[in-house]
Amino acid sequence: MKTKSNAFRLILSFAFIFCVNGFLFGVPSLGNNSDTIEGQKHAKPHYVKSSYANESVELKNDKIQVQFFKRLNGWGWGEISTGSGKFMAVLEHLGEIMIRDQDIPMQLVALSVKKKKDSEGETLEFDVKSVVVRDVLLKTSFDNWMVYPFTEPAIVGKVSITLVPNTSMIKLKYRLKATGNYYACYIRGPWIKVGESSFGIKKDDAILPGVDWAIGDEWTSGTDFFKDPWALRVAPHPYKVTAPVMSISYEGTAIAMSWDPNQLATRWFNYRKHVQQPVFSSPNFVDRKNNQLMGLMVPDATIEGHENEVVAQIPLELKIGQMINFDADLWLTEGNSVSALTDWVKQHELPEPATPRWSYQETLRLIANAYNTNFWHEGEGFGLLQRPQDKAGPSVPGFLVRYVEENKTTPLAKDLKKKLDWSKGQINNRKNKSANDVEELKREGDRIIAKQQTDGSFPFNPDMIGKDDFMVATSFIEPMGLTGETALDITINPAITLFDIGEKTGDKKYTDAAKKAVDFCLNMQRPEAGDYWETPLHAANLLAAGHASLANFLAYQELGDTKYKQKAIYWMRTLLVFTNFWEPENVNNLYSTKPVLSSSDWYFANWVRDHVQWEVLSVFSTLSQRNINWTDIDPEIDWLKFQTGITNAAIQWMNIHTDKNWFPHNLPESYEAYERGDFDYAFPDTHNSVTGNYGGMMIPPGPIAENIYFILDRTKATK
């Protein structure tokens, strides 16, 4: 009898282990419903790291297939494939909770599934409950030595999965409720394991906009472009995410998930609000599995000190009846993660830009007046003086010439005209009258070509930068780029100058060299190196995206080959990765941009936390000066609205010393000049996406005026 008893216990133990594989536990019976359906029998899942009860149910069309499977104790996990059957990801569960006072997480499962069809699409509905560990252990060998205090499900609710007709869009809706007072270390909603049981950790790219952009075998949260402690970005402060989308692509197919970043995920009474916290990891170092993770959870990290806590150090206090909601859209698209983000922009359209702080005409007047007063230094010229070595000089800002012409009867314009005339005189006196412009252009072109390598690329030389950032970085830890290697902006930016020289001189030699440089970059996918003077050479960069889009468009204009136009469109769309398309309730982040997804000098500035606006303004100022309207080139995106958005954001940035929202960083002595109003109507270098405060050096506002004029002209032309 003893032998039989031990054998019986052994069988029960193996059954228990089989049930809990992949953190699965049993649940009490949920009862039957006349609307429930029986799943297909013996469908074979790709995912074998779970128990399986030989039942499945699916949603499918010619674009996507979603199949859900029943574990031994209830419906609980799904698989996502393309319409043609390419297996992309596993939805690991229908939710999971980890309670502080129990060392085993509890997944949400359902004994039944309902299927319905309406105008919204075809939907699977699961009535879910979190498992009760005691029930699983009952009558097993664990029953007499493991006793957990919880005797009922901690969470109950409904999970709905809807396939939108004629699309690859799956809408995930979680409506959950706490059954009692618990301390939750996490509650997970959608938890997508990309590449599980298929391509594993292989990818083309992985993007969490504004936070991470890894390609090939790079890790997200890797130390390629950050060093610890800034490198870890697996669960960042939600405000740092510029667009609420995450995507991973492999062999020409991207899987993406989006959410509403301002949605109330949970809150009790007058406690603080929690939003859906994104979790992003490629490879999946969170679960330490051979896959890649896209997920949503609570609690969130809107308290910056609690970033990256996938298991919260301070648990979420749940109260009886407290609601926990997750909503997400999941879809597939052809292309890479830039294509997925472009899809999201098309689905939602670009947000309406914020109302500018002042009207455009008033903003132009304020900027012009600043150039007439605090930016003017008698006998020297225009200048924004912040350091002892800063000097003013004669210059003729193009927007000021136009402002004076259009407002010539005003006292301000009359004063400015005198200053412009003086500046023109100084410039003419300094010019070498004998210089042959064409010959000088050719000499410049020859100097550039002399540096070009036989494959069309240009080598990187940190010694020629003129800043000591690379020496500092190398002294601290390692170089941010190696002498002789190349990257997109290092090669593509000279091509712009060569195209211009070729056009002005009529010499095909320069155009051919420009084409060779552009061709070298055609296979590149991530914009890199635009901030080469202080950041890692291969970090994803906004300025490089702008330069690459312009260079490829010039190649298309010159050569007529549509491959250059398509690449120009691609590079401009990479700007979407850096741009805030939402803002929280308490910080003005809309259309502010990240300059580069890296740190400066490895340690001295965190460009995931901070926005910089001058780079994106310069991209569109350059296009404006060339009278290029990008919406005409890429009409699927309203780029004029985009330009309006980034310009209105920059107007919000414009400094007035009485606002008291700016501090310098490397020039503390300049604060006294700030308080005097010397910098009024300039705009600062950085904006903190979490606090909303400004800092850094001040930048002259001329590019803001240039963008305003372009917007006014294009708006007038379309009426």
Image: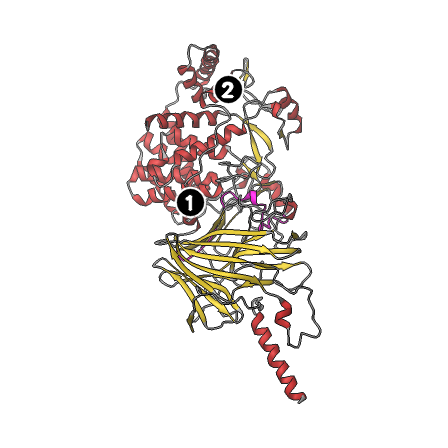
Residue 541 rendering spot, x and y as whole percentages: 49, 42
Picture quarter with the N terminus: bottom right
Q: Is residue 626 visible?
A: yes
**314, 245: nearer the viewer:** 314
Task: Using the image, tell me which numbered label, if any, was put on residue 554.
Answer: none
Neighbor class of circle 1 (other Cα within 10 Å; few <14, some 14-19, many 20+) is: many
Q: Give the residue furthest to the bottom.
A: 1
From this view, report whether residue 539 is shown above or below residue 295: above
Picture quarter with the C terminus: top left
Q: Is residue 407 left or right of residue 223?
A: left
Q: Is residue 59 left or right of residue 394?
A: left
Residue at left offset 47%, top offset 27%: 704
Q: Earlier in the sequence, mark 2 or mark 1?
A: 2
Residue at left offset 58%, top offset 55%: 177
From this view, report whether residue 226 is shown above or below residue 557: below
Q: Which residue is mark 2?
A: 366
Residue 417 rendering spot, x and y as whole percentages: 45, 12
Q: CA distance from mark 2 to mark 1?
A: 44 Å
Residue 76 rendering spot, x and y as whole percentages: 51, 64
**56, 46: nearer the viewer:** 56
Disc 1 element: loop
The three-letter amino acid code for the residue at tag 2 is Leu
Disc 2 element: helix
Main secondary structure of the magenta stretch: loop
Residue at left offset 50%, top offset 30%: 650
Magenta stretch: residue 93 in it? no
Residue at left offset 70%, top offset 75%: 144
Task: Using the image, tell me which numbered label, if any, was put on residue 457.
Answer: 1
What residue range appears in magenta?
227-252
Q: Is residue 232 left or right of residue 123?
A: right
From this view, report whether residue 569 is shown above or below residue 327: above
The three-letter amino acid code for the residue at tag 1 is Ser
